[in-house]
Image (spheres, rainbow, N blue to C red):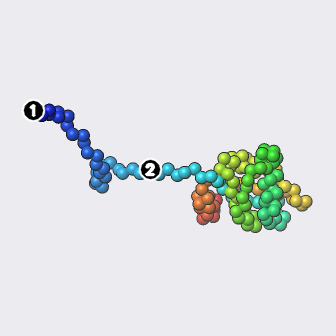
Amino acid sequence: MTEAMDLDPPPPTSTTSLPKPNTSKPLLTTLTLPTPPFSYANLTLLTPSPSTTQQQLDPLLLKSYLTSALSQFLGQTGAAIPVDILQVGPASSWVRLPRPDLAAFTAAIASFSGLNNGKEKLVLRVEAAGDFLGALVDRGEEREIWGK
């Protein structure tokens, strides 16, 4: 009785080897960050004339300004954009909103002519806006360091 010979070579075994540190090929690593659900914006209150006393920004004034700007720019759809007020300072504030609405939000704030509080017109300026809060905070501190 003769046995049939297997003429096919055995399949190669699967091995994983890391490149040696002294080789000329660099080791590449990739990282994919998930799309964040929220975006952040830093807003600053401006008054047209520097001779007048600086208006203090409070949560009620900020919410009124944002609602007016969004409703003027996008109507009731803009007024329905949920904006979370994270921090309010004397002249600066941080807000959080859904990421898909960031472009419409910044356009509405930039194009709004301002609120009239009886004596002067109040205008908000978007200092920084983006998806990652840590990068925006660092950008503001960088501006303070370099005097920009």
Query: What residue appears at the point 81 percent right and 62 percent down from the top-left corner?
Result: 60
Q: Nearer the viewer, residue 13 or 64?
A: 13
Q: Quick one: SS at disc 2?
A: loop
- As drawn, the label of residue 56 is none
Task: Give percent across and percent down for residue 142.
Answer: 59, 61
Position of the N terminus, as image quadrant, is top left
Say left or right for 42 vs 32: right
CB within 8 Å, label 2 to label 1: no
Query: What residue appears at the point 72 percent right and 49 percent down from the top-left corner?
Result: 105
The residue under label 2 is which amino acid type? Thr
- As drawn, the label of residue 30 is 2
The residue under label 1 is which amino acid type? Thr
The answer to whether residue 105 is visible is yes
Say left or right for 79 vs 6: right
Say left or right for 111 vs 4: right
Task: Give percent across and percent down for residue 77.
Answer: 78, 45
Q: Mark 2 Cα within 10 Å, few/some/many (few <14, many 20+)?
A: few
The answer to whether residue 130 is visible is no
Q: Residue furthest front?
A: 1
Q: Quick one: SS at disc 1?
A: loop
Q: Give the CA distance from mark 2 to mark 1.
A: 55 Å
Say left or right for 38 vs 19: right
Query: What residue appears at the point 73 percent right and 53 percent down from the top-left corner?
Result: 82
Q: Mark 1 Cα within 10 Å, few/some/many (few <14, many 20+)?
A: few
